[in-house]
Image (tube, rainbow, N blue to C red):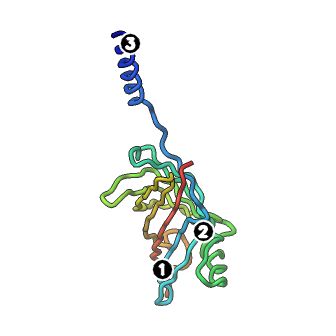
Amino acid sequence: MKKVFFIVSAVMVTLVASAFTIQAIINWQILSEKAQVKFKMEAHGQDLVGSFTGAKGDIKFDAAKLSEASFTCSIDVATIKTGMEQRDGHLQAKGWFDAAQFPTINFASSKIEKTAEGYNAVGKLSLKGVSQDVTIPFTFESAPDNTGIFKGTFTIKRGDFGVGKTDGDIGNEVIIMLEIPVANK
């Protein structure tokens, strides 16, 4: 009888202790070589599409612990590609992104919140020396192999960041589409 009581007691202590074990939030490593940051805007009556590559950063995300979640990410301006090398160089120049003085575009979240469609990352987008509050709606799909992908789309006004002139034939609104694959660290 004492042996059964001891075994049952040990099992109960283990169960109670595991219920109070604090588990760390999941840290995700961005798979930079596969990350896609695309953009689309109107230029001279046509859609101008392009992309940046090599996203880097620190992502802490667990849907069960959103109060601890955070995103701190950056992308190198010099990786811009629009399909025309001359235009890419023009966009990196002082009048547009000024890549020499401001080599990265950065995002740092202040909170992550649940929505009906997925999540919102609320934070500061810093571009060309200007920081603006933005909300990035996103979804997260995880896979059994401890990988996943964050997908989101949001719109900014490039004039708010001093990127190019806002008069003329080039639209002010820029749609940004993110596909950021990650692996559990």
Dot 3 amino acid type: Lys
Which of 140/167 is in front?
Answer: 140
Q: Give above or below for 176 relative to 83.
A: above
Q: In the rendered structure, find residue 53 and report the number of the disc placed on it.
A: 2
The CA span between labels 3 and 2 is: 63 Å
First reached walking from the N terminus: tag 3 or tag 2: 3
Q: Is residue 129 visible?
A: no
Q: In the rendered structure, find residue 108 and report the number of the disc placed on it.
A: none
First reached walking from the N terminus: tag 1 or tag 3: 3
**How many residues crowd around disc 3 within 10 Å: few (fewer than 14), some, or many (20 or more)?**
few
Q: Give above or below for 126 relative to 17.
A: below
Residue 149, image x, y percentages: 48, 60
Q: Which residue is mark 3?
A: 3
**How many residues crowd around disc 1 within 10 Å: few (fewer than 14), some, or many (20 or more)?**
some
Residue 133, image x, y percentages: 45, 59
Residue positioned most to the right: 100
Q: Give above or below for 158 relative to 106.
A: below
Residue 17, image x, y percentages: 41, 25
Helix, strand or loop status at disc 2? loop
Q: Which residue is mark 1?
A: 41
